[in-house]
Image: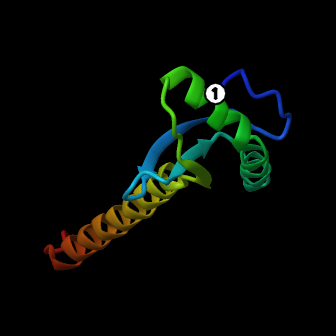
Amino acid sequence: MLEGELSDPRIAPGYVTDVVLAPGGKSARVFVAVHGSEAEEDSTLAGLMAARGYIRSQLRERMGVRHVPELTFAIDRSERMTGRMDELLGRLRKRDKRREETAAKAGAPSEG
């Protein structure tokens, strides 16, 4: 549905990463990863919230069930955070390697 059925121009390309159903099944939180800036994430969230009635009706029809939970949407930034964490860990490794090399050079006998 996110890829082509919702015609709201506010909705940027993205995909559903997780759905958390509340106990009892009365509500669900849908996590969406968006390819774009924070402004595009915000507009996508607004577009999805505006379209949730349509999305629920389509889910009801496609799944053939009587009750579809109330939907709320949230932006999933875990990929972005994972990338940032990898970057920071890489910097730490480089810094530690430089320190080890410096310490090794300082401890080695000098040629002369």
Where is residue 74, by image quadrant? bottom right
Name the residue located 57 percent from the left edge and 30 percent from the top edge: 59
Where is residue 101, by image quadrant? bottom left
What is the three-letter code of the residue carrying label 1? Gln
Q: Within 10 Å of the Cα at label 1, are there few (<14), some (14-19), or many (20+) other Cα atoms?
A: some
User: Element under label 1?
Assistant: helix
Q: Position of residue 86 (x, y in %)?
A: 41, 55
Q: Position of residue 46 (x, y in %)?
A: 78, 51
Colour mapping used in the image: rainbow
Name the residue located 13 percent from the left edge and 74 percent from the top edge: 109
Q: Is residue 71 left or right of residue 91?
A: right
Name the residue located 72 percent from the left edge and 51 percent from the top edge: 45
Name, please, the residue furthest toward the right: 9
Q: Is residue 1 above or below residue 109?
A: above
Q: Quadrant of the N terminus?
A: top right
Q: Which residue is mark 1?
A: 58
Q: How many marks?
A: 1
Q: Is residue 89 left or right of residue 80?
A: left
Q: Is residue 38 left or right of residue 99?
A: right
Q: Is residue 28 above or below residue 53?
A: below
Where is residue 9, by image quadrant? top right
Q: Is residue 10 above or below residue 72?
A: above
Q: Position of residue 99 (x, y in %)?
A: 30, 73
Q: Is residue 110 left or right of residue 86?
A: left
Q: Is residue 98 above or below residue 75?
A: below
Q: Quadrant of the C terminus?
A: bottom left
